[in-house]
Image (cartoon, grey):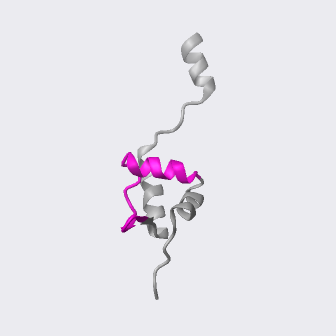
Amino acid sequence: MKPEILSEQEAAEMLNVSAGTLYRWRRDGKVKHYRQMGRLIRYTPEDIENNLADFAAEDPKPVTSQSVTKARFG
């Protein structure tokens, strides 16, 4: 059985981002898991899962606007 291969657009939809954002992430080295077939970039569902796991490990909890306000204005 052949593994499922996703286009850039399909992978972007799975990540809930635009294809342009996915391109920038790949260009900037944020997306590490993908397959290049000539000029085509393809992903597997496992690639997407690995990228999501990497993002979760790298991203600290976001700062809320309330804590920023208190930090700036006491």
Residue at the extreme top: 73
Q: Is residue 68 above or below residue 6?
A: above
Q: Is residue 54 left or right of residue 13?
A: left
Residue shown at 46% from the left, 51% from the top: 23
Residue shown at 59% from the left, 30% from the top: 64
Residue 18: give x, y in percent of width and height: 58, 51
Residue 74 visible (yes or no): no
* Frontmost residue, 21 versus 60: 21
Residue at the extreme bottom: 1
Image quarter in which the C terminus is found: top right
Q: Is residue 28 magenta?
A: yes
Residue shown at 44% from the left, 48% from the top: 25
Residue 30: give x, y in percent of width and height: 40, 49
Q: Which residues are magenta?
A: 17-40
Q: Is residue 5 magenta?
A: no
Q: Is residue 18 above or below residue 71?
A: below
* Frontmost residue, 4 versus 72: 4
Residue 21 visible (yes or no): yes
Residue 37: give x, y in percent of width and height: 38, 70
Q: Is residue 48 above or below residue 64?
A: below
Residue at the extreme front: 39
Total marks placed: 0
* Frontmost residue, 53 versus 5: 5
